[in-house]
Amino acid sequence: MPKKFEPEMNSRALRMVAEALPDHPSKTEAAKHVGGLLGISPETLRTWARREEIDAGHAPGITSGAELEIRRLKRETAALRKANEILKAASVFFAKELDHPTTR
């Protein structure tokens, strides 16, 4: 299971990568350096940096806010589909009861 980092740690690490960038030939090397200092995977730092670029509008992609909204809507759609199936089953059941009334 991946570790969860506090937002402060995330922003601090990204600042450190940006500050280390002039001293390294690439973002990857800067991420490796900062990752080694903080005990964070360079790939995690790269992912955070990419997410920050997308959220800022500097790179194409789905923003964090839009991604959260999409997930929420997918959950809501699944719940509505399940409720719809239950209602269909109930209507079939009650329609059969109306077709064959019981006599007492």
Image (tube, rainbow, N blue to C red):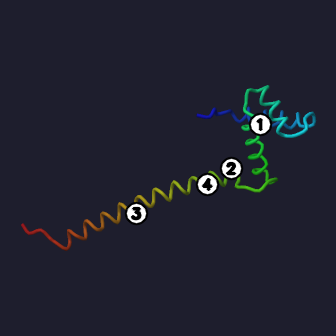
Rounded to the nearest whole Å, what is the CA distance between mark 3 and mark 1? 44 Å
Percent across and percent down for residue 77 are: 50, 59
For this rendering, which residue is in front, 17 or 9? 17
Kindly identify the residue that appears in the image at 79 percent across and 50 percent down: 56
Q: Are marks 1 and 4 in contact (CB under 8 Å)?
A: no
Q: Which residue is drawn at 30% across and 63% down?
A: 90
Q: Please tell me how crowded label 1 is: few (under 14), some (14-19), or many (20+) other residues with Cα within 10 Å.
A: some
On-image quarter of the C terminus = bottom left
Q: Position of residue 41 (x, y in %)?
A: 72, 33
Of the numbered discs 4 and 2, the one sitting upstream in the chain is 2
Residue occupied by mark 2: 64
25 up-or-down from 80: above or below: above
Residue 33 drawn above or below residue 52: above
Residues at discs 3 and 4 in contact (Cβ within 8 Å): no
Point out which mark residue 69 bears.
Answer: 4
Work out whether mark 2 precedes mark 3 in sequence or the reverse, and give the earlier one: 2
Q: What element carries label 1?
A: helix
**Residue at point 45% right, 56% down?**
79
Given residues 75 and 35, the one toward you in this image is 35
Q: In this view, does 25 lie to the left or right of 92?
A: right
Give the Cα distance between marks 3 and 4: 22 Å
Q: Residue 84 shows which numbered tag?
A: 3
Residue at numbered disc 1: 11
